Amino acid sequence: MTVSTRNARTPGHAAHKAGTLSPGEQEVLWDIEEHFWTSGVDSARATTATNAVMIFPYPPGILQGDQIWTHLRERTGWRSIAMAERRVTRCGDIAILTYRVSAEKPDVPITKALCASTYLHDDDRWLRISHQQTPVT
């Protein structure tokens, strides 16, 4: 196996070329992400790729495709959420949102987690291709 050792000052691979999103694009993505939490399963499904992967605290763990919607049917529609420590990273047509969330709804303990969602800009729209939640205790 041959490993390339390019100069660290001249990245050759596209993954080393981080970009930014315009304020308008960032607003669109954060709006999609907030609705993922608050607007129910149909809204979340409309902004998620068919074969997306989501990782939740065990159980349920790692879900893909239709498994996601069975799980989320009971776990969306949070009454209120607060996102802090928001960050956006872009590489070409991929954007990654990372944040700390505090979410609440009646009769459920407040959920606090570190989250990451990855979006693909495809056919003039952003679609979530992955989402992960790591509980904050």
Image (cartoon, grey):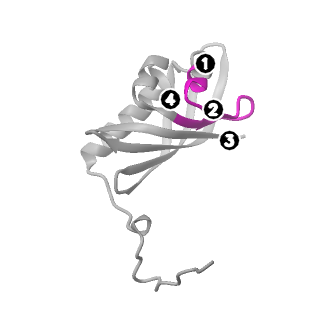
Residue contact between numbered discs 2 and 1, judged by CB atoms under 8 Å = no
| N-term-proximal mark, 1 vs 3 | 1
Is 28 left or right of 106, judged from the image as shown? left
Query: Which residue in the structure is indicated by mark 3?
Result: 136
Which amino acid, mark 3?
A: Val
**Was residue 63 drawn as part of the magenta stretch in this picture?**
yes
Which amino acid, mark 1?
A: Thr
| N-term-proximal mark, 3 vs 4 | 4
- Residue at 40%, 76% (x, y): give it: 12
- Residue at 68%, 41% (x, y): give it: 136
Residue contact between numbered discs 2 and 4, judged by CB atoms under 8 Å = no
Q: For the C terminus, give its image quadrant.
A: top right
Query: Which residue in the structure is indicated by mark 2?
Result: 63
Residue contact between numbered discs 3 and 2, judged by CB atoms under 8 Å = no
Which of the two discs, 3 and 2, sits closer to the camera? Answer: 2
> Where residue 81 is drawn, which disc sits there?
4
Image: magenta residue range: 52-70
**Was residue 74 drawn as part of the magenta stretch in this picture?**
no
Which amino acid, mark 2?
A: Leu
Rendering coords of residue 41 (x, y %): 49, 19
| Alpha carbons under labels 1 and 3: distance apart | 24 Å
| Alpha carbons under labels 4 and 1: distance apart | 22 Å
Badge 1: how crowded within 10 Å, few (<14), some, or many (20+)? few
Query: Which residue in the structure is indicated by mark 1?
Result: 70
